Image: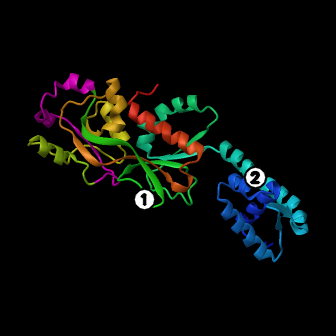
Amino acid sequence: MKRRLPSLNALRAFEAVARHLSMTKAAEELSVTPAAVSRQVKTLEDYLEVTLLRRANKALFLTDAGQACLPALTRGFDLLAAAIRDLGVFDARRPLTVSVTPSFGAQWLVPRLDRFRALHPTFDVRIDASTRLVDFRHDDVDLAVRYGPGGRPGLRAERLMSEEIFPMCSPRLVEEAGPLDSPARLRGHTLLHVDNAQLDEAWPDWETWLITAGVTGVDARRGPRFTQPSMALQAARDGLGIALCGSVLASDDLRAGRLVQPFDLSFPVNFAYHVICPESTADRPRVVAFRDWLLREARSGQAPG
């Protein structure tokens, strides 16, 4: 059924004035000026072609028409407020869906989730592992973490962590094959490659790194290739070779000694990890809570567990 209704703002203004019999008190309740309230009431009266309020001796009075419609309007706004509260309860019970790339989720986020749970035990979080761009208008996603240049129009993006790229390997590999005391020692090792179309153009490959390090005689095209950095890191942890990977995903392994950085030469890159959400939902309490927690975790540099 098609409903023919006047402006909701005009109805709210009249209902508030009718309850308080005061333009000033109605304006305070609605956080607008008395003049704005007066204009809205006049708009409603013009729409209905009925007088709802009268002034006498600086006081406001309801007309018969105003008195007749006030109880139903008040009940209507009470029902509307109750429906919004119910929606809020429903939203609070729905898991907060966070979209992350598989490597970021496995290497960095999931090991830290218990700390978020301890702070917000009533929040359920759903991790959606995906490398594609999120369409917040159609996807059931509240928040995303993506590696890239930042946000897009209509989205709020906050930088989470910057990245550096350098070789890393298992300490066991160093013990068994001898010290990697110079980049030239790479000639006798397997190189592990990351092939990921989402990495920026400044992300160095092994050929770029070797040229910068002044190393010759190494075939930079040889070695296993992985589409996910987490797989290259796993191969490096298992001693299968030396990976050229980013500092963010490797940070916990480096801190725990599961991986080591044998050389000082590293590449900063243009892209960074960002927390992204629509501007329209950026200030929802649950979104704010998770985004703020992510930012604190990133800035603290604290290991998981």
Q: Residue lying furthest front in this view?
A: 57
Dot placed on the residue nearer the N-terminal end, 2 or 1: 2
Give the colour scheme of this rendering. rainbow
Q: Which residue is more in the foreground, 299 or 183?
A: 299
Q: Is residue 28 visible?
A: yes
Q: Which residues are magenta?
A: 171-200
Residue under label 1, please give it. Answer: 152
Q: Residue at x 12, y 31 (%)?
A: 182
Q: Is residue 4 visible?
A: no
Q: Residue at x 38, y 53 (%)?
A: 150
| 51 shown above or below 195 | below
Place residue 104 in its image quadrant: top left
- Judge from the rendering whether residue 160 lies leftward or rightward of residue 17; answer left or right: left
Which numbered dot is residue 67? Answer: none
Q: Is 174 in the magenta?
A: yes
Q: Residue at x 66, y 43 (%)?
A: 92
Element under label 2? helix
- Judge from the rendering whether residue 221 lies leftward or rightward of residue 154; answer left or right: left
Residue density around tag 1, few if under 14, some if 14–19, many if 20 or more, within 10 Å: few
Residue 19: image location, x then y, percent: 82, 55
